[in-house]
Amino acid sequence: MQRLLATTPGSLLVAEADGVILGALIAAWDGWRGNMYRLAVISEHRRAGIGLALVRAGEEHLHRHGARRITALVSCEDEVAAGFWEAAGYPQDREIGRRVRNL
């Protein structure tokens, strides 16, 4: 988190009420594409618009930095998250798969 905040200020979006963090989203710009990931909302505050508000704020943040395309990195196995992102306007791209290698 320290490196994220040091290198890309504003990439961590936080929703809070009365000093309590209710949700967070990372919206990072790599100079070519915007990426949103690690969306989280405290379970008892879900379905209240917090997640969607974070996504829209992430879109605005990334658009200001030049993003014209945004990828939402979402677990393939998380049906709840998949439904949320679909409803937010992020359909699954069935043509491009992501490959990852840990170093």
Image (cartoon, grey):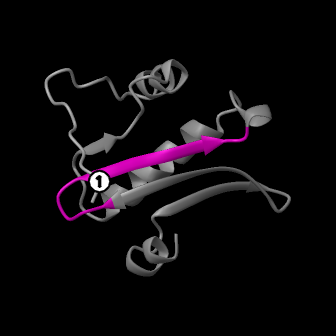
For the point 33% across and 63% down, the residue is 64
- Residue 59 percent coordinates (x, y): 40, 49
Q: Is residue 57 above or below residue 66?
A: above
Which region of the structure is painted magenta? Answer: 29-42
- Among all residues in the image, which is located at the extreme front? 103
For the point 20% across and 65% down, the residue is 31
- Among all residues in the image, which is located at the extreme left? 95
For the point 47% across and 55% down, the residue is 26
For the point 62% across and 58% down, the residue is 14
Quarter of the figure with residue 7: bottom left
Taking the magenta stretch, the answer to whether it contains residue 33 is yes
- Residue 80 percent coordinates (x, y): 55, 21
Residue type at mark 1: give it. Asn
Q: Is residue 77 above or below residue 20?
A: above
Q: Is residue 10 above or below residue 81?
A: below
Give the tally of numbered discs.
1
Quarter of the figure with residue 97: top left
Residue in the foreground of this view, choosing between 66 and 73:
73
Query: What's the magenta bit mostly, secondary-structure-wise?
Result: strand
Quarter of the figure with residue 91: top left
Residue in the foreground of this view, choosing between 43 and 33:
43
Taking the magenta stretch, the answer to whether it contains residue 39 is yes
- Among all residues in the image, which is located at the extreme right? 18
Q: Is residue 17 above or below residue 96?
A: below
Tell me the residue that label 1 is attached to.
102
- The answer to whether 74 appears left or right of 47 in the picture is left
